[in-house]
Amino acid sequence: MNKKKWLSTPYLIWMIAFTVIPLLLIGYYGFTTRDGSFTIQNITAIFSPAHSKALLKSLYLSLLCTVVCLLLAYPLALILKNKNVGQGGFVIMIFILPMWMNFLLRTYAWLNLLDDGGIIERIFSLVNIPYQSIIGTDAAIILGMVYNFLPFMILPLFNVLTKMDENVINAASDLGANSFQTFIKIILPLSLPGIVSGITMVFVPSLTTFVISDLLGARKIMLIGNIIEQEFSIADNRHLGSGLSLVLMIFILASMALINRYDKNGEGNAF
Amino acid sequence: MKFKRFFSQIYLTLIFIFLYAPIAVLIVFSFNSGKGSRFDGFSLRWYEELFQSEMILDALWNTLFIAVTSALIATIIGLISCIGISALKGKPKAVYMALNNIPMLNSELVTGLSLMLVFAAFGLTAGYPTILIAHITFNIPYVILSIMPRLRQTNKSTYEAAIDLGASPTYAFYKVVLPELMPGIFSGFLLAFTMSLDDFIITYFTRGAGINTLSTLIYSEVRKGIKPTINALSTIMFVSVLLLLFFINRPKKATNEIL
């Protein structure tokens, strides 16, 4: 039995080489200059007007996207639970299936739908509603984010809700709670691991995206992800890029801590 | 009550339309005879061009090769580590699971950048191997998450019975434990394959010059305007998966086992 333990060692080495050391390297580059001396300028660079504006914009859009996803996904997960479609299987398939069409291409397709002369404009003009293209505005970015990350909110919520003990809910209504009270006092608190896991899985990728703003922002919207990406790919300044990434990681670590606190047993896992 | 059911049906339909409208648009426009965002008429022109475009076929081959290889290696490493991790207890186990969670919870941007930095530091030139290592790294956690719950459910006594009856531990593992884990292994592989197939950000930062997957090819073409040939390819891929899933799920009971 003891020999088995060693089977996990190769993966430990792999994780140290390709998860731990890479993160430490970001720390190293973030706190050094090109000639290798220590500096905190790469971190404080976040307070420059352009950078802080981009960070605030990212925070604003990703928080809004997270709220919209939660509000859309919770009723959906409840409906799916009540439909008794069974655990996993079919439901997961419906939400994973779109991933088989490249995500850049799917996001790009929204251009076709939303842009001037696009499909939505033509549908609107059939019923004589004036339509203004939202491409290049905050609304387009949020739509792109919600579209891409909604499944990551639905799946953990659905998992937690279907695993919930039906007897607890029945007991509440037997004891005289109406359906609203049952929801607030029983279902909502019990689904907390799923909510927290869903929030993290939507918030982190939408906070750090640079692709969605690239595709739907018409080059007008700079998010913190775009700035970091350009530091690496265009400006070739990995020190500044790493420093700004470290700032982003504060938010990522905060969400990880949130998960560790409320979803210890992984009940809210998406898959 | 009837009203409530009606309402939930409408809600489901709306979300479904939201998720699948872009896909429908892509499929419809792959049959467009023109190039723009107006539908000019039905044609198979882009499908013909697709099979003559070496660039796209090359990217397709890279994408599939990387997805299959990384999912396969991740499944093997994941399976072996699951057995090892399940023999651990307390703190060491918690450390393993916390480390395992990092690539899943971390932002892809940070993962991609940090891997790019580490490859440069190790002196690996960006290319096939670096993309593969990166994909294996973010795939293993999904495999472990799929296999772990199965492993927890397996009955230890059957394994011990096999040992008592004279089977070697390896033989007992192959004959008794592995078959029970098979659904978890399969869904882990499928999940890893899908994640790798759909990945753009991490590939973008770890690929070398001249190597394109479908994602990076599409990203570089966005500026020039994407040609419907890529729509044609995506349509073929999407429909093949749809058919594949349809056939796998034909026996009704198997549905829950597979995903």
Image (cartoon, rainbow, N blue to C red):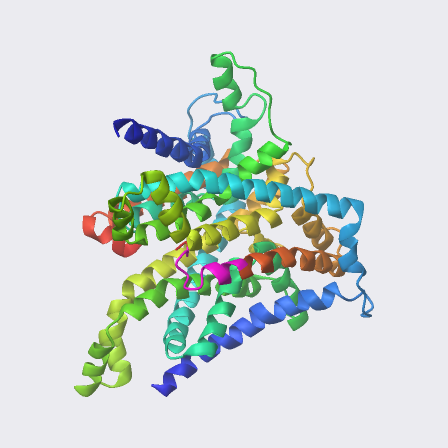
Residue A87 x, y percent position in the rendering = 29, 51
Q: Mark yes or no: residue B35 visible.
A: no
Q: Is residue A262 magenta?
A: yes
**Residue at x 32%, y 61% (from the top left corner):** B186
**Residue at x 47%, y 18% (from the top left corner):** A123
Residue furthest top in the image: A128
Residue B209 x, y percent position in the rendering = 64, 56
Report the side of B117 relative to B246 (left or right).
right
Q: Is residue B30 magenta?
A: no
Instruction: Locate the N terminus of chain B by quadrant.
Output: top left
Depicted A25 relative to depicted B107: above or below: below
Residue A35 x, y percent position in the rendering = 83, 68
**Residue at x 53%, y 29% (from the top left corner):** A112
Q: Residue B17's image quarter?
A: top left
Image mark count: 0
Q: Residue B166's image quarter?
A: bottom left
Residue furthest front in the image: A176
Residue A23 x, y percent position in the rendering = 63, 66
Q: Mark yes or no: residue B144 visible.
A: yes
Range shown magenta: A258-269
Q: Nearer the viewer, residue A192 or B249?
A: A192
Instruction: Locate the C terminus of chain B by quadrant.
Output: bottom left
Report the side of A90 relative to A22 (left or right).
left
Residue furthest left in the image: B165
**Residue at x 62%, y 71% (from the top left corner):** A21
